[in-house]
Image (cartoon, rainbow, N blue to C red):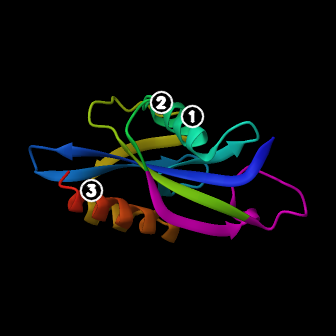
Amino acid sequence: MRKPIQILVIPYRKNTKLNCIEYCLFLREDLNVWQGIAGGVEDYETVEQSARREMFEESNIPYNSNLIKLSSFVSMPSINISGTKWGKEIYIVKEYSFGVCADDTEIIISDEHKIFKWVDYSEATKLLKWDSNKNALWELNERLIKNGY
């Protein structure tokens, strides 16, 4: 069973040849939209444990990778969550966001996605569909720049 909580994880890496930060986006198989890694929190998991599990399942990013908990947070209608039903009593689902360093990771996607691509911040904001993903990306990008990544 799943808690009415979602996670979003945006992988990033430093492209030293282009001297920029790149973000990994995934094209969903079922909705045909670009997004970060997204998934649900199982009853036995914390939000961070779920983020680590989802990033490994959907992209092969190791559990022990450097995860940044973002302040970006959204509440969304439960009917907007693909493939999950909580019953009539759950109307709103919370989504927590993270960034994860994937500098040395070979991305291997799950069947949930058609393809993935590494793009700079400008391109990522054009590709992402949902405002929650764009807000989390903005915060992650600002944090990385201010911390000299």
Q: What amino acid does circle 1 point to?
A: Arg
Residue range in magenta is: 69-92
Q: Position of residue 5 (x, y in %)?
A: 69, 54
Look at 44% across and 69% down and name the residue there.
135
**C-alpha span from label 1 to label 3:** 23 Å
Badge 1, how many Cα within 10 Å: few under 14, some, many 20+? some
Q: Position of residue 53 (x, y in %)?
A: 57, 34
Provide the residue designation for mark 3. 144
Q: Are marks 2 and 1 in contact (CB under 8 Å)?
A: yes
Looking at this rendering, what residue extends furthest in the right direction? Answer: 88
Any part of residue 130 in sight? no
Any part of residue 120 in sight? yes
Badge 3, how many Cα within 10 Å: few under 14, some, many 20+? few
**C-alpha span from label 2 to label 1:** 7 Å
**C-alpha span from label 3 to label 2:** 21 Å
- Between 113 and 71, which is closer to the camera in this rendering? 71
Badge 2, how many Cα within 10 Å: few under 14, some, many 20+? some
Name the secondary structure under disc 3.
helix
Provide the residue designation for mark 1. 53
Position of the N terminus by quadrant: top right
Q: Are marks 3 and 2 in contact (CB under 8 Å)?
A: no
Q: What amino acid does circle 3 point to?
A: Leu
